[in-house]
Image (cartoon, grey):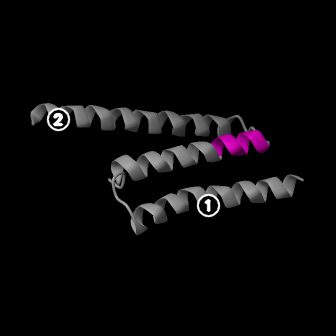
Amino acid sequence: MSQARFTSSKYLTLIWIILIVLTLTTAYVGYLELSGLYVVGFVLLTVLVKGQLIIDHFMGLRNVRGLWRHAMLGFVIIIPGIIFTGYYLSSV
């Protein structure tokens, strides 16, 4: 039992480190004041990945089926999609 908790703790720590690296990467992109469609796409893709990781591992919805998981995933997919579409249409 103790071994299972340790493995889970190590796994969640790895997920947390990935989240921190993605956050620092997007912060660095902001610091460099980069812009353009690909940069916005990259930042929104990191938002999607981070949201997916948080929903699955820290909110515990990985094995949940139904309304709660779909609502959270929809939020993570639809909002960045709307932002990207707006940015794309404003640059055309």
Identified at 49% across, 33% down, the residue is 21
Identified at 58% across, 56% down, the residue is 77
The residue to which callout 2 is attached is 4
* Dominant SS in magenta: helix
The residue to which callout 1 is attached is 79
Say what amino acid the circle numbered 2 marks: Ala
Say what amino acid the circle numbered 1 marks: Ile
The region drawn magenta spans 37-43
Identify which residue, 88 or 69, lies in the foreground.
Answer: 69
Task: Check disc 1: other Cα within 10 Å, few if <14, some if 14-19, many if 20+.
Answer: few
Q: Indicate whether residue 38 is drawn in magenta.
A: yes
Q: Indicate whether residue 85 is drawn in magenta.
A: no
Apparent side of residue 37 relative to residue 59 in the rendered image (left or right):
right
- How far apart are the alpha carbons under marks 1 and 2? 36 Å
Provide the secondary structure element on which disc 1 rests. Answer: helix
Residue 16, how many percent across, how many down?
A: 39, 38
